[in-house]
Amino acid sequence: MDKRQPYSDEYYMDEAIQEAKKAEIIDEVPIGAVVVYQGQIIGRGHNLRETSHDPTSHAEICAIRAAAEFMGDWRLEECDIYVTLEPCPMCAGAIIQARMRTCIYGTVDPKAGCVDTLFHLLTEERFNHQTEVVRGIRQQECAELLKLFFRKLRKRKKG
């Protein structure tokens, strides 16, 4: 029996985790994101940097692009983004530029996280827009995906 409730943070984060698993299948760092508008997922994305040879092909950017195309507008003011890993400076900037309402993330990024860890870009009052932040949704599952991926990667490099 599926215990996930539609329209809950856990439900949408599970969808982002499914996106992260798509990245892992193609040997990309398993990070996924979904953009939600009025309960509907309007943008999905997973890391494609290695595949596309594009440093901007982060999960969040891919999901935001799809959502903007769906909406026919770059302003995503009534949208929420769910992402498995705390956004980096580029992705946090894109969330601000899209004027997104809320960013919900799974696990922290100690090396590049710019929502809570290194900087607090989404809530910086000097910007013309602030985004609400929700942390730690499905934290363990999100962290585990990354740990297992990098463990396998290190093992492959040694062997």
Image: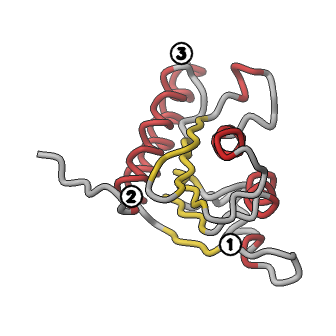
Q: Tell me the residue that label 3 is attached to.
A: 159
Q: Is residue 93 left or right of residue 35?
A: right
Give x and y (percent) for residue 81: 58, 56
The residue that appears at 77% across and 70% down in the rendered structure is: 121
Mark with earlier residue (2, 3): 2
Of 60 and 80, nearer the camera is: 80
Q: CA distance from mark 1 to mark 2?
A: 20 Å
Q: Tell me the residue that label 1 is attached to.
A: 131
Q: CA distance from mark 2 to mark 3?
A: 32 Å
Residue at the far bottom: name it. 125
Give x and y (percent) for residue 89: 79, 57
Which one is closest to the eye, mark 1 or mark 3? 1
Mark with earlier residue (1, 3): 1
The residue that appears at 73% across and 71% down in the rendered structure is: 122
Instruction: Give the quarter of the image for residue 51.
Output: top right
Q: Compared with residue 70, is residue 3 higher up or lower down, i.e. above or below?
A: below
